[in-house]
Image (tube, helix red, strand yellow):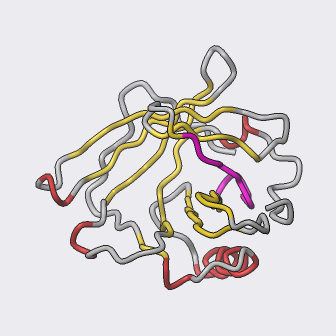
Amino acid sequence: MDSIQVEANFTIERYLGQWYEFEWMYEGYLDPASVFQDFAHVYRRQQDGNITDTTRGRDPAKSHGCLQFSSTIYLTDTPGKMLFNYLNQGNIGNYWVVETDYTNYSVVYNCIQLNPDDTCKTNQAWVYSRHPNLSDDLRARVSHVIENLCLNETSFYKTTHKNDCSAAPNLDSVVG
């Protein structure tokens, strides 16, 4: 796990704001009809310095209605290597920003389960974009990052964006 590098000189202030989920990795099969849609995350600084991740999207299993939930991202002493408390229920995972240009794309990594030799047995990864789509050149850059993580791009599910569940009211979008 120590071999995984994160964004050099990562700056949380530049990362805050709205990010669209472009694609995400799941090491298993999901029926494409059950994959969530229109997912976007808004990251805001809390008074304690940590980050609130407010997520909105559509669940096909629930008549495609909008849903919203919050999680917390805890900063660590290593910029870019944060901890993610999913739904604030104590299920803590890694939130490592492997690469971002802050204005277009971000690749985030989590190792769910380690092998005895400290390599990752079960991975998760997300590709985020400041816009619902990525240009071909940025898509190629993201593919290169995914390849360097030794992840299989065929394990990624594309998040479709057709009917935006816009950001929650009064959430300022900070870009770059």
Place of residue 135 in the rendered image (x, y in percent of width and height, measured from the top left): 57, 75
Which residue, as the protein is rendered here, is positioned at the far left? Answer: 63
Q: What is the total number of numbered labels drawn onto the structure image?
A: 0
Place of residue 98 in the rendered image (x, y in percent of width and height, measured from the top left): 74, 60
Q: What residue sits 36% from the left and 36% below the top?
A: 69
Is residue 54 depicted above or below 60 in this figure? above
Q: Is residue 67 left or right of residue 51?
A: left
Q: Main secondary structure of the magenta part?
A: strand
Place of residue 11 in the rendered image (x, y in percent of width and height, measured from the top left): 79, 41
Q: Is residue 70 left or right of residue 10?
A: left
Quadrant of the frame with the N terminus: bottom right
Q: Is residue 49 highlighted in magenta?
A: no
> Hey, which quadrant is residue 160 in on the image?
bottom left
Viewer-proximal residue, 158 or 135? 158
Place of residue 130 in the rendered image (x, y in percent of width and height, measured from the top left): 55, 54
Which residue, as the protein is rendered here, is positioned at the far top? Answer: 47
Q: What residue sits 65% from the left and 48% below the top?
A: 94
Q: From which residue to which does the magenta span run?
A: 92-104
Q: What residue sits 39% from the left and 39% below the top?
A: 167
